[in-house]
Image: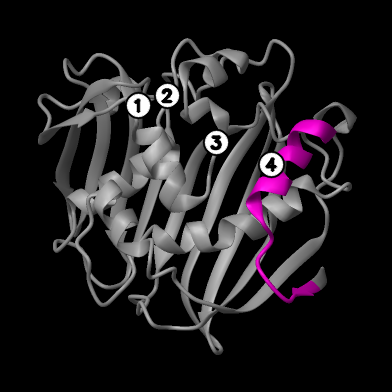
Amino acid sequence: MRTEQLGSAPSLTPLMVKAILTAPTRRGGELPDTELVLDGVRADHDKLPDYARVCGFRVAAHLPGTYPHILGFPLAMRLMTDSGFPFPLPGLVHHGNVITQHRPVPTEVSLTLRVHPGDLEITERGARFAMATEAYDGDVLLWEEESLYMHLSKGGGSKSEGSKGDAEARPASPSALWQVPDDIGRRYAAVSGDHNPIHLHPVTAGLAGFRKPIAHGMWTLARCLSSLEGRLPDAHRIEVRFRKPITLPSTVGFAATRDGDGWTIGVHDRDGVRTYVTGSVAPV
């Protein structure tokens, strides 16, 4: 794998413009065999309290478990907008995440981030692949993630992972109800830098084929994790699949049930009929 050392984090706004302009040129193919490395990455202490507030975390001496994702997101965007990347960014389905926190990440730590494409799988529905991010303190791996994406083939299905497994995961009743406001997409974009238009406004979401704006998957994952704050060991792994998008505004139910030393989690509509997220959290 070719390693490219960056001197600074890429700016997201030009990358998002590039993603739109170059989308028609993407014709499929192999993922680039490239890893981007950036040293000296620190949390934005001006935005960190706002991130915690938007996602439901407490402000603490360690970063929220989903926060390193937004530190690595500009590097992932850089890879996915390079000329050698085979799939157009507009229209990619973010269908899941796997995050392993090996130990809490101090808010003051200076991290080295390493980001590279993961495995590519061709399915009947389309091409499925991962973007992997690793966060190190020196030589010590503190945190790692796989963000899972799908590029749907023609006739490959809807812009959601579908309902497979929903019936088994549906809870009898939610542990909590969340009021998800119509501006949560804009609020999360402001603290994360992820200004994907499908999350921001009915007009921009409509241009991408959505009836209403939808919640960021990473906001939903963060909200799930914050709901278990104080009940997880320092080292844990959270795995989620995004089954259907949460349209804004919505009232949804969060369910968390004990599963051995971990938890089975889900986000559903308030009646438990429609499943948005399924997943698990376990110690490692």
Task: List the residue tagged with mark 4.
Answer: 16
Q: Please report contact status of discs 2 and 4: CB closer than 8 Å, yes or no.
A: no
Q: Is residue 57 among what the camera can see?
A: yes
Task: List the residue tagged with mark 3.
Answer: 94
Q: Please report contact status of discs 2 and 1: CB closer than 8 Å, yes or no.
A: yes
Q: CA distance from mark 1 to mark 4?
A: 26 Å
Q: Please report contact status of discs 3 and 2: CB closer than 8 Å, yes or no.
A: no
Q: CA distance from mark 3 to mark 4?
A: 16 Å
Q: CA distance from mark 3 to mark 2?
A: 10 Å
Task: List the residue tagged with mark 1.
Answer: 276
Q: Nearer the viewer, residue 171 or 268?
A: 268
- Decide which of tag 3 and tag 2 comes sooner along the chain: 3
- Decide which of tag 3 and tag 4 comes sooner along the chain: 4
Is-magenta flag for residue 248?
Answer: no
Q: Is residue 120 above or below residue 100?
A: above
Secondary structure state at the residue bearing disc 3? strand
Residue type beneath disc 2: Pro
Task: List the residue tagged with mark 2.
Answer: 245
- Decide which of tag 1 and tag 3 comes sooner along the chain: 3
